[in-house]
Image (spheres, helix red, strand yellow):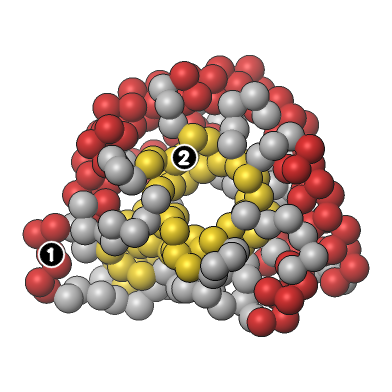
Amino acid sequence: MIRFWGQSKFSVDPLKPVGCELFLREKIGDSWVLPDDFAQFPPQQIADLLLQTVSVLSKNFKNVSINLDPEQFIDPEFCAVLSEVKNQLLPITLEVELTEHASKFPVNSSEIQTAAKHFFEAGIDLIMDDVGSGSNQIDRTLLLNPYISEYKFAIQNFRKTRSLTSIIHSLSFWCELAAKNNKLFTVEGVESKTDLQLLINYRVNLLQGFGLARPVFLPIQAERSRRAVLPFTQK
């Protein structure tokens, strides 16, 4: 069984939840874990789950986003089914986040660019997830710039192995690039007041992280009365 878990996204001033990132998780035993292979779930199954999940979200949310790995992103069926459901989600806007994950089979830049253009033409906002990490480096970001609306910078991807100085350098680079290209800039991985104080000096539009809100189980409409919330675990 699969369900979405959701983590709120916060505006900066005032600091309040305005959106939600959805994470697909699979129930194994008594835990919800990261699936070994997202390809096992057809696009229509994910789109149907999206419809059943968003209907129970707070009406204060302006948007929801789902993550697509490169293999899913270039699959025309994903763009087709998400284009069909996006109007059914209104007034909540649907966004797609292209993950930084390496593809399991060769995916070239032309395929990624073509897919981004199709999502853009379908009226689905695109987010470059975890910029500066994994496959989402500067070359891919600039390639997709005409079609994406937001950069997300993940503090946690840098602070584990680099000094605070290096984090600030990378943060500044992507913040300035977002401003230059008129993109929204989101910082994720916010875990403390210290992080918030550090970000005061940067043009940040949205915040996300365990220090603000942890991922929570999102039941579908038929499950709301069951209170079937289980611990969020990572595999």
Q: Secondary structure at mark 2?
A: strand
Disc 2 to disc 1, C-alpha distance:
25 Å
Q: Position of residue 36 (x, y in %)?
A: 43, 53
User: Residue at 68% of width from left, 66% of height from top?
Assistant: 156
Using the image, determine if residue 116 lies above or below residue 55.
Answer: above
Q: Secondary structure at mark 1?
A: helix
Using the image, determine if residue 202 lies above or below residue 40.
Answer: below
Q: Which residue is disc 2 drawn over?
A: 96
Earlier in the chain: of badge 2 and badge 1, it is 2
Residue 6 shows in the view: yes
Q: Quadrant of residue 28?
A: bottom left
Q: Position of residue 201 (x, y in %)?
A: 80, 65
Contact (CB < 8 A) between labels 2 and 1? no
Crowd tier of the residue under label 1, counting other residues whose Cα lies within 10 Å: few below 14, some 14–19, many 20 or above: few
| Kind of residue at disc 1 | Glu
Q: Which residue is disc 1 drawn over?
A: 223
Left or right: where 203 falls relative to 21: right
Q: Position of residue 197 (x, y in %)?
A: 73, 76
182 or 74: nearer the viewer: 182
Residue 112 shows in the view: no
162 or 104: nearer the viewer: 162
| Kind of residue at disc 2 | Val
